[in-house]
Amino acid sequence: TEKPHKCGECGKAFGLSAALAQHQRSHGSGKAFQCGDCGKSFAWSSHLDRHRRIHMGEKPYRCGDCGKSFSQS
């Protein structure tokens, strides 16, 4: 598959320009979601939500075998 759209930051190539634009947010210029507790920034609100579980101590994912809980699936 041809991937003519190349990231100038890391060299990763994409078939669609929209996919490249989405990827480029991960390099910092589009990190608009900042954690109010530690200041870490994220390109995606879902990544901030996942990160916030660290500060809140939330562990919504439970192992069915051992019963241990985790903050990420």
Image (tube, rainbow, N blue to C red):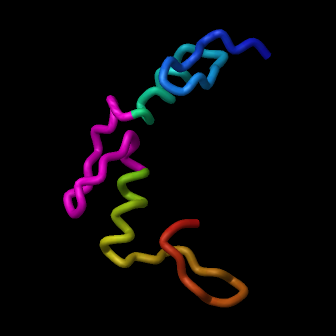
Compared across the picture, whether 35 is left or right of 13 comes to left
Whether residue 66 is in magenta: the answer is no
Q: Which residue ends up furthest to the bottom in the rendered image?
A: 66
Position in image of residue 38 (x %, y %): 24, 61
Question: In the picture, residue 73 is in which quadrant?
Answer: bottom right
Residue drawn where x is 36% and y is 45% of the image: 42
User: On the rendered structure, is 46 left or right of 14?
Assistant: left
Q: Position of residue 48 (x, y in %)?
A: 36, 53
Instruction: Please indicate whether residue 63 sits to the left or right of residue 37 in the image.
Output: right
Q: Quadrant of the N terminus?
A: top right
The residue lying toward the viewer, choosing from 66 and 23, is 23
The rendered magenta stretch, by its main secondary structure, is classed as loop
Q: Is residue 64 above or below residue 33?
A: below
37 left or right of 65 in image: left
**Furthest residue to the right?**
1
Q: Quadrant of residue 57?
A: bottom left
Where's residue 30, x and y in %? 34, 31
| Number of dots carrying numbers | 0
Q: Residue at x 59, y 86 (%)?
A: 68
Residue 32 within the magenta-colored segment of the rendering: yes
Residue 53 placement: quadrant: bottom left
Q: Residue at x 23, y 54 (%)?
A: 39
Relative to 43, is 24 above or below?
above
Residue at 42 percent across and 50 percent down: it is: 46
Residue range corresponding to the magenta coloring: 28-46
**As rendered, which of 29 and 62 lies closer to the eye?**
29
Q: Viewer-proximal residue, 64 or 8? A: 8
